[in-house]
């Protein structure tokens, strides 16, 4: 292709000359402009680091006890619990809010603690799996999980139990799920399909789902 072919179809006032030289020069210039900042950073002539944000103090009620933490504001609630308070019952599985192993209760609502920042919950109450039992007395759901062998490796269990506690509360208040048929009832009927749908955000890699459903049904006072 010669320069005349490159310019075919460019008529009128907007016509300009495109040659191989201009194409090569334009491409080379763009490449240099892209590469130069990276090269300068690599050579150390440009400081590309950003100063970390100043720490913030957050007050949390964890399992009924007050805690005051000074944290990097980017610290997730999960990391605050595990790394700063040694409450390791909430597990870090996917760290993307997909497995549910980090589920805790905040002001009575279940939430993936890996997806929220600790500073967002100043002066709020947080309940983890460590705060469910009353002394030596397990929470009814914990007891049911043991009786029905609702766990195998146990990694997801804390999140499963915390999620199930609030799931039962949601169904009792009439909050519907995707599979709820009777939307006018004050309490959602906890069929197996209903329980599985409501617990779908909690993944068990050991596939103990039938036992988890049985444990939840027992806690709800339903035949298993």
Image (cartoon, grey):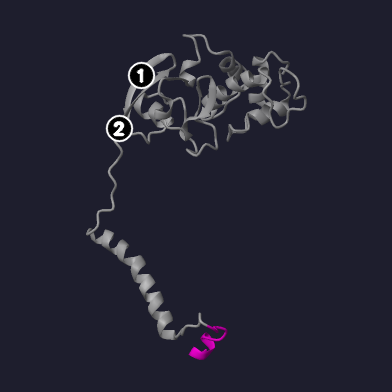
For the point 69% across and 26% down, which residue is it?
176
Q: Nearer the viewer, residue 217 or 53?
A: 53
Q: Nearer the viewer, residue 123 or 41?
A: 123
Q: Residues within 10 Å of mark 1 (few under 14, many from 20)?
A: few
Left/right placement of residue 193 relative to residue 18 reads right
Question: Quick check: can you spot residue 80?
Answer: yes
Q: Upstream in the sequence, badge 2 or badge 1? A: 2
Residue occupied by mark 1 = 67
The percent coordinates of residue 82 (x first, y second) are: 39, 28
Q: Extreme front residue here?
A: 13
The percent coordinates of residue 223 (x first, y second) are: 73, 16
For the point 65% across and 28% down, which residue is it?
198
Q: Residues within 10 Å of mark 2 (few under 14, many from 20)?
A: few
Q: Are marks 2 and 1 in contact (CB under 8 Å)?
A: no
Describe the element under mark 2 as helix, strand or loop.
loop
Q: Is residue 118 above or below residue 68?
A: below
Describe the element under mark 1 as helix, strand or loop.
strand
Question: Which mark identifies residue 55?
Answer: 2
What range is drawn magenta here? 1-12
Q: Does the magenta run of residues contain 10?
A: yes
Left/right placement of residue 81 relative to residue 3 reads left
For the point 63% across and 25% down, which residue is it?
212
Q: CA distance from mark 2 to mark 1?
A: 16 Å
Q: Quadrant of the C terminus?
A: top right
Q: Nearer the viewer, residue 170 or 85?
A: 170
Q: Extreme right residue here?
A: 182
């Amino acid at each position: 292709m010669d320069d005349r072919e490159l310019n075919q179809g460019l008529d009128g006032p907007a016509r300009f000359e495109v040659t191989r030289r201009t194409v090569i020069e334009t491409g080379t210039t763009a490449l240099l402009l892209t590469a130069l900042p990276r090269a300068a950073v690599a050579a150390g002539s440009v400081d590309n680091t950003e100063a970390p944000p100043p720490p913030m103090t957050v007050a949390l009620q964890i399992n009924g006890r007050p805690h005051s933490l000074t944290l990097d504001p980017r610290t997730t609630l999960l990391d605050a619990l595990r790394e700063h308070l040694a409450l390791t019952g909430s597990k870090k599985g996917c760290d993307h809010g997909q497995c549910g192993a980090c589920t805790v209760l905040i002001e009575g609502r279940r939430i993936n603690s890996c997806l929220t920042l600790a500073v967002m919950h100043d002066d709020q109450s947080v309940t983890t799996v460590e705060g469910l039992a009353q002394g030596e007395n397990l929470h009814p759901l914990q007891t049911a999980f043991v009786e029905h062998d609702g766990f195998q490796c146990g990694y997801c269990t804390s999140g499963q139990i915390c999620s199930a506690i609030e799931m039962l509360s949601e169904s009792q208040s009439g909050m519907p799920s995707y599979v709820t048929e009777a939307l006018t009832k004050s309490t959602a009927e906890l069929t197996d399909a209903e329980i599985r749908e409501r617990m779908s955000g909690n993944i068990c890699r050991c596939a103990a789902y039938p036992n988890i459903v049985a444990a939840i049904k027992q806690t709800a006072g339903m035949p298993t």
